Image (cartoon, rainbow, N blue to C red):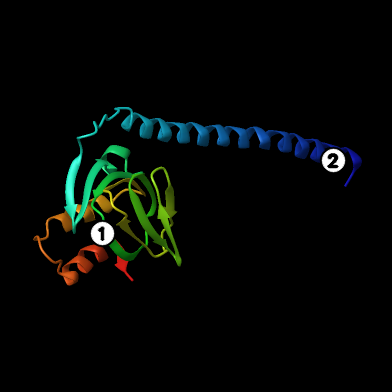
Amino acid sequence: MERKDFLKKSVMGIGALSIIPSINACKSETKKENSNETSKAAVTELQNPKIVKANEGNKLNVLGDNQNIKLSGKDTNGQYTLIEQNNEPGVGIPPHVHDNEDEVFQVLSGQVEMLVGDKTTILQAGDLIFCPKGVPHSWKVVGEEKSRAMLSIFPAGLEDMFKELAELPAGPPDMEKVSAICGKYNLKFV
């Protein structure tokens, strides 16, 4: 190859290389714009605030667990569910595992014994615990006073299971029916 042809091809190659970052920058800007449009759409859907007063919400008795669903997936675009629980001493839920949801359980008053994995602890007012999906956990109200707690579930969806369970007849639960309903939501008792 002659020097003249070499320089010509090299300059063309260098010129092309200088254009590539510009092309990549344009692609990146387009991705950012599309991402911003998606984010703006999600934010637009959630721009209507929802105020839930202390005595408001969707109150359910789920196998003895007195729940008040304050925010559902419909309110949070499926991101999370927020449930207030108000229970007497002795009320609890046996060990179970969620395949899909993480939970944060914060005690507002009273005492709650929590089992997460193989660790048991007593939560007092102000304490909270994180229960990751796939890890067995249970809770029980202990002590002399009623317990009030906030349960946050990520992502939303279990509130639909709780609604189904609340429709079961009063009295001792038919564990076969309970397990079937819970199984639809990838929750199992252990």
Task: Tell which of 88 and 81 is nearer to you.
Answer: 88
Q: Amino acid at mark 2?
A: Asp
Check if mark 1's residue and mark 2's residue have beta carbons within 8 Å: no
Which mark, by number, is residue 5? 2
Task: Tell which of 64 and 15 is nearer to you.
Answer: 64
Q: Secondary structure at mark 2?
A: helix
Residue 119 in the image, given as x and y percentages of width and height: 46, 64
Vertical relation: 190 (above or below) 60: below
For the view shown, which residue lies furthest in the front direction? Answer: 144
Q: Quadrant of the C terminus?
A: bottom left
Task: Tell which of 65 and 135 is nearer to you.
Answer: 65
Residue positioned 28% across, 51% down in the render: 157
Quarter of the rendering containing residue 183: bottom left
Residue positioned 27% across, 43% down in the render: 72
Quarter of the rendering containing residue 113: bottom left
Q: Is residue 7 left or right of residue 109?
A: right
Q: Amino acid at mark 1?
A: Gly
Residue 86 in the image, given as x and y percentages of width and height: 24, 47
Quarter of the rendering containing residue 73: top left
Q: Is residue 13 left or right of residue 35?
A: right
For the view shown, which residue lies furthest in the right direction? Answer: 3
Residue 114 in the image, given as x and y percentages of width and height: 38, 58
Q: Is residue 87 left or right of residue 104?
A: left
Vertical relation: 9 (above or below) 44: below
Q: Local crowd at mark 1 within 10 Å, few (<14), some, or many (≥20)?
A: some
Q: Disc 1 versus disc 2: distance between alpha carbons? A: 89 Å
Q: Local crowd at mark 2 within 10 Å, few (<14), some, or many (≥20)?
A: few
Dot 1 or dot 2: first in sequence order is: 2
Residue 77 in the image, given as x and y percentages of width and height: 32, 40
Q: Which residue is mark 1?
A: 90
Q: Secondary structure at mark 1?
A: loop
Residue positioned 35% across, 51% down in the render: 111
